[in-house]
Amino acid sequence: MKNNLPEKVSEAWEQRMGSAVFSTTDKYGNPNAIYVNSIRKFNESLFIIADNYFDKTRKNIQDGSKGSILFQAGEVESYQIKGSLQYHTDGIFYDNMKQWNKTKHPGHAAVVLEVEDVYEGGVKLM
């Protein structure tokens, strides 16, 4: 079930610093985390991540992994957004990703994370 981001987290996203960390797990529960720069908030309940060079991450998503996005805003504020993942090679999310993904990257697919849980540091906001 997707939820809207709390306003505080939505505003923090706009002020984020550096790359975000995108995490998935394989079918055995082993974690995989990567840095992502090709990521955008689609709306208050969906994020799009461009699959430019995924390998393990792509396999994990195709095997049904949930995901998380971790980012920092300010010197000590960190936020984590968790949710279900969808993998799109065409359609509205793919077309949206192609509009902002740098042309030097292949943009194989658009991964959509539906917001389900949100944390500020270790405190669950929703």
Image (cartoon, rainbow, N blue to C red):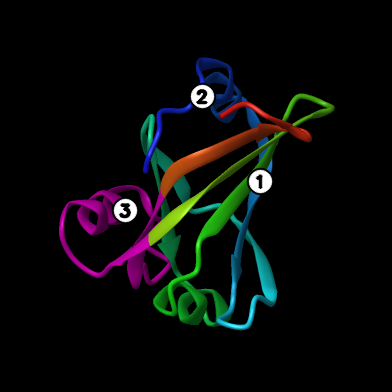
Task: Give the mark toward the camera: 3 or 2.
Answer: 2
Which quadrant: the N terminus?
Answer: top left
Residue marked by disc 2: 10
- Identified by mark 3, the residue type is Met
Mark sitting earlier along the chain (3/2): 2
Q: Is residue 89 visible?
A: yes
Mark sitting earlier along the chain (1/2): 2
State whether residue 89 is above or below residue 74: below
Q: Residue at x 44, y 79 (%)?
A: 63
- Identified by mark 2, the residue type is Ser
Q: Helix, strand or loop at disc 3?
A: helix
As for residue 71 lying within the magenta part, the answer is no
Q: Helix, strand or loop at disc 2?
A: helix
Crowdedness near tag 1: few (<14), some (14–19) or many (≥20) residues, C-alpha within 10 Å: many
> On the rendered structure, is 63 left or right of 36?
left
State whether residue 12 is above or below residue 92: above
- Identified by mark 1, the residue type is Leu
State whether residue 96 is above or below residue 9: below
Q: Is residue 54 visible?
A: no
Q: Helix, strand or loop at disc 1?
A: strand
Crowdedness near tag 3: few (<14), some (14–19) or many (≥20) residues, C-alpha within 10 Å: many
Magenta-colored span = 86-113
- Across and down, in percent, residue 96 comes to 25, 49
State whether residue 90 is above or below residue 21: below
Marks 3 & 2, CB-CB < 8 Å contact: no
- Residue 97: give its label: 3
- Across and down, in percent, residue 3 comes to 40, 33
> On the rendered structure, is 116 left or right of 42?
right
Mark sitting earlier along the chain (1/3): 1
- Residue 70: give its label: 1
Q: Residue at x 62, y 26 (%)?
A: 125
- Residue 86: give its label: none
